[in-house]
Image: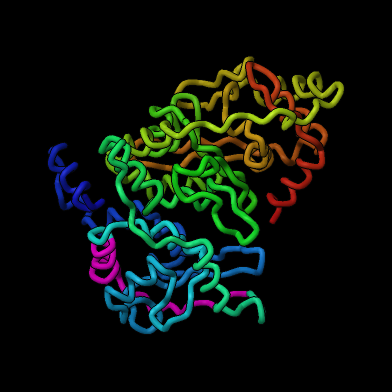
Amino acid sequence: MSLGTWYLLSLLVAGGSAQAMSAGEYVARAGDCTACHTAPGGALLAGGMKFPTPLGAIYATNITPDKQHGIGSYSFDEFDRAMRQGIAKDGHRLYPAMPYTSYAKMNAADMRALYDYLMQEVPAQNAANRAGDISWPLSMRWPLAVWNQLFHDDAQYQPDNGQSAEWNRGAYLVQGAGHCGSCHTPRGWAMQEKGLDSKDPVFLSGAELDGWYASNLRGMPQEEVAALLKAGRSRHAAVAGPMSEVVAHSTQYLTDSDLSAIAAYLHSLAAEKPQAGKAVAPVAGNQQAGQRTYAMYCSTCHGNKGEGSDNTIPALAGNATVTADNPLTALRVLLEGAQTPITRQATAIAMPGYGWVLNDRQAADLMSYLRGNWGNQAGAVTAQQVQEARKLAEK
């Protein structure tokens, strides 16, 4: 069943109005088109968003129905080819920063609904596309054909008959339109995702991307997943960084049944087993120094034992971001502060940043304390790691 049909049926079952959102807009929400194709302060889906890559910056394109700069002259077959194979109307190949490797899994009905939405409901914007900053010869696109041969499978999602309808629905959303693996799956030497579905244990196991660490999603509690995707925070946790935009633009608009399906699928994935020797040895004396800093700046909100406040202040005890193998996101939140997204279910809650008051050593001691207490068992953080996170925060 297509995303759009599922959405409309969900509205009818819930007694809602099918006019709330078209089937195509629902697919666009699930695919989070807005976050990438709408620049800050720019017109809806008119492109211009900058994406840094190891080769240089590229910019999202205009996908409004403008015939000169957008996709208004695309036939459905040309649109479908771009979405599934990464080939534009004029034949040039798209950089896989556009997650066609995931969108290829979408079924025909959803692809048609998305096309109709973009062509019929989105206002055309006469906004020219910006060329990338990648210099020649690295800017040549023909090697992408080889990349596709090596790493891309354009087959649509095939249900697993050994799993429930809910599990398959969640797998379809996560692997396809939701393209969760684009951020949460480690990448290889050619920047390819190392796994594209649940058959690979590295799929969704966490990855560093664009100065943030996208957490391990495997085996997450179902209730927590659904709450985080709907409201940006759960009883004991909250989203931060780029994930806030995902919730704001995309997942808060999904039906409860789809959120439950995503949660059931992610929970079913076997969590990665910790590897011996991964933790960094604690620095002598840092626990005491970290405890003093915590008491001074953190305990008022997060509690004396990192327990937080239900549905308001995230707990630090058992917090997956705090205890992640890579502490980058936790460090950036500490240094820069964070704000949960404004959603239809919850107002935003902000945490101030402490980069201005803590030096690298103090921040490292504090983070090491958080990662080694209240049942948390993660390695210590070094001043060098803080320094590197601070540089990212200052960009």
Which residue shows up at 22% across the image and 59% down it? Answer: 109
- Image quadrant where one finds the C terminus: bottom right
Is 200 on the left-hand or right-hand side of 44?
Answer: right
Is 76 on the left-hand or right-hand side of 218?
Answer: left
Is 395 on the left-hand or right-hand side of 49?
Answer: right
Q: Nearer the viewer, residue 387 or 86?
A: 86
Q: How many marks?
A: 0
Residue 80: percent from the left, percent from the top?
32, 69
Q: Nearer the viewer, residue 233 or 275?
A: 275
Residue 90: percent from the left, percent from the top?
41, 83
Residue 318: percent from the left, percent from the top?
57, 23
Residue 381 at least partly seen: yes
**Magenta span:** 111-133
Q: Is residue 114 magenta?
A: yes
| 12 shown above or below 276 | below
Is 107 on the left-hand or right-hand side of 41?
Answer: left
Which residue shows up at 47% across the image and 62% down it? Answer: 152
Q: Nearer the viewer, residue 351 or 48?
A: 48
Residue 301 at least partly seen: no
